[in-house]
Image: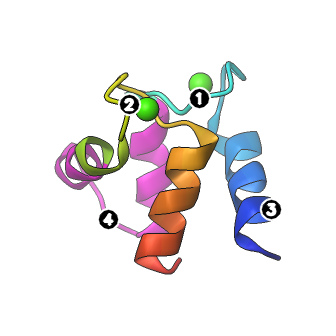
Amino acid sequence: MNESQMVDELFEIYDKNQDGVISRGEFIELIDCLLDEKGAHVSSQLLARFDTNHDGVISKSELLAMIKEMQL
Ligand SMILES: [Ca+2]
Ligand SMILES: [Ca+2]
């Protein structure tokens, strides 16, 4: 599975309302599972770091950048 397939799969699971972006609440659950890191603190930091267009949500391309950088 390549990185962009992984992003598609993660969106299928964690984009609960299927609006095409990962909101803060959805992102907390994603981080919980992906990094085994609990709590809003880590996910807030990651959201701030990888939300590169600062719209408060994570798009597919932003998640892809995160996966590449963190080598998940
Ligand atoms: Ca969503
Ligand atoms: Ca964004």
Confirm if mark 3 falls within 8 A of ligand 1: no
Mark 4 or 2 closer to N-term?
Answer: 2
Per the model, the C-alpha gap separating discs 4 and 3 is: 23 Å
Confirm if mark 1 falls within 8 A of ligand 1: yes
Picture residue at 46% right of the left edge, 27% below the top: 23
Which of the 4 quarters of the picture holds residue 20? top right
44 left or right, relative to 21: left
Picture residue at 50% right of the left edge, 60% below the top: 65
Disc nearest the viewer among 4 and 2 = 2
Pointers 2 and 1 in contact (C-beta within 8 Å):
no
Residue type at mark 1: give it: Val
Pointers 4 and 1 in contact (C-beta within 8 Å):
no
Picture residue at 74% right of the left edge, 61% below the top: 4
Badge 4 element: loop
Pointers 3 and 1 in contact (C-beta within 8 Å):
no
Badge 2 element: helix
Mark 3 or 1 closer to N-term?
Answer: 3
Badge 3 element: helix
Per the model, the C-alpha gap separating discs 2 and 3 is: 22 Å
Q: Which residues are magenta?
A: 26-46
Q: Does 32 lie within the magenta span? A: yes
Magenta part, dominant SS: helix
Q: Which residue is mark 4?
A: 37
